[in-house]
Amino acid sequence: MEFVDFLPEKLLQFILVTIFSLIIGLALRRLHSEKEEMRIFGTDRTFTFIGILGYLLYIFDPETMIPYLGGGLVISGFLAIYYWNKINNLEEFGITTIVVALITYCIPPLVITQPAWLYILVVVTVLIFTEMKKSFVEVSRKFDKDEFTTLAKFLAIAGVVLPIVPNEPFVPFLDITPFNIWLAVVVISAISYMSYLLRKFVFRDAGILISGILGGIYSSTATTIIMARKSRKIKSDVPRYATAIMLSIAMMYLRILVLMFIFNLSLAMMLLPYFLLLVFFSFGVAIFYHYRYVAGEDRPEDVETFDKNPLEFKVAMIFTLLFVAFSFITHFVIESFGLRGLNILSWVVGVTDIDPFLLNLFQGKFSVSSAAIGMATMQAIISNNIIKTAYASFIAGPKMRMMVLWGLGAISLLNGILVLFIM
């Protein structure tokens, strides 16, 4: 740092412009064969000279930038002539190299006027996107026709609807606003959408165990049903499907912990040790099943995937209605029956999707302590685990039934013991 401070400012700027321009030119040279290099206007040296020219013209008159703008017009003219000949003689229409050349010409003002993180970010982005041409082609082939519609839905609910909904309580006795409700929809949709993208593009050919992990991010209940149904068809792979269910349970605990940190930091800090213990214990059960029954098997893995669009309007509306319903129900139960009523309600809601109930608990300001909300959270999860055990036992065969009973039974028992410590 002392050496850098010792250098004259303009010398340091010149060195940075030269190095960045050269690196971009070298990256473009690597992408073209010797035969292709004869058909492009230049690579490493040309891009270095473009950067140096931009630097010199900019420092001549940094106030009006007339020399710099004039040089930009001249370079743009040469590039236009090159592109016109490229279209007519080679019948090629790509303009990536031309755009990168213009970006290189813009580097000198960035280095001189902007903070280091910005111009470094620009150079890094150019290098990454230059190198990822083939990767983008491969990814684009995986997109379904409705994939961008799904992305547009997510951007709409997160970036358009959320900022405009009012943040004032719509019912005097409930401290819940339309903004709180829609924020919950956005967060749950974001988590589900992340799981969907990972499963579809990153782990497209993933096996049963990875599907269990990703399924737990999306919905551990759906994962349990799918794995149980599949295990009945492929009886020889039962331990692998049971292990996947345990992995989905671990991810469910982790997902709920993340939601707590987003919506109720104090509650999350209070329950953090308990949830971390449950996450590690659930992973421990999965690891035990894997090394006791699964390890060493070498067979093709086939499992039903979670490629269904998680951002369906109907799903969002159902979640919103459940959230509002649980807001009224929870308030009524607490006001009428107190802590005992909340405890009973937490056991009952386990038969449904517990996310709306839990998010309502995390956001709402009810007349009970944080410990009571923590107990209700843990009890609702136990109840939901019991329902998942019942689903798996009803759908799967005897061997799967016993593995799920032992695994989920042990996890639920630990969950129940931890509830006693919260009390």
Image (cartoon, rainbow, N blue to C red):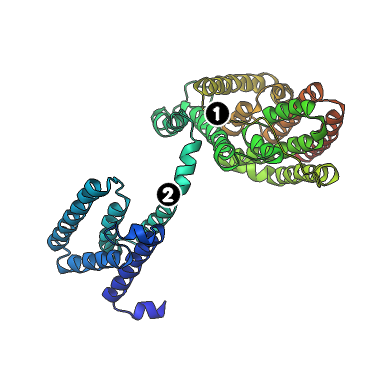
- Mark identifier at residue 310: 1
Please report the residue visible at 23 percent of the width from the left and 49 percent of the height from the top. 89
Q: Quadrant of the C terminus?
A: top right
Name the spot of residue 219 as percent of width and height, x first: 65, 31
Q: Secondary structure at mark 2?
A: helix
Name the spot of residue 126 as percent of width and height, x first: 37, 55
| Between 11 and 172, the one nearer to me in the picture | 11
| Type of amino acid at the residue the image marks with label 2 | Lys
Residue 153 falls in which quadrant of the image?
Answer: top left
Which residue position is annotated with label 2? 133
Q: Quadrant of the N terminus?
A: bottom left
Name the spot of residue 235 as percent of width and height, x first: 82, 30
Please report the residue visible at 35 percent of the width from the left and 59 percent of the height from the top. 35
Looking at the picture, does residue 358 appear above or below residue 247?
above
Please report the residue visible at 31 percent of the width from the left and 47 percent of the height from the top. 94
Looking at the picture, does residue 55 appear above or below residue 145?
below
Q: Mark 2 vs mark 1: give the one in front.
A: 2
State left or right for residue 344 relative to residue 185: right
Q: Is residue 389 visible?
A: no
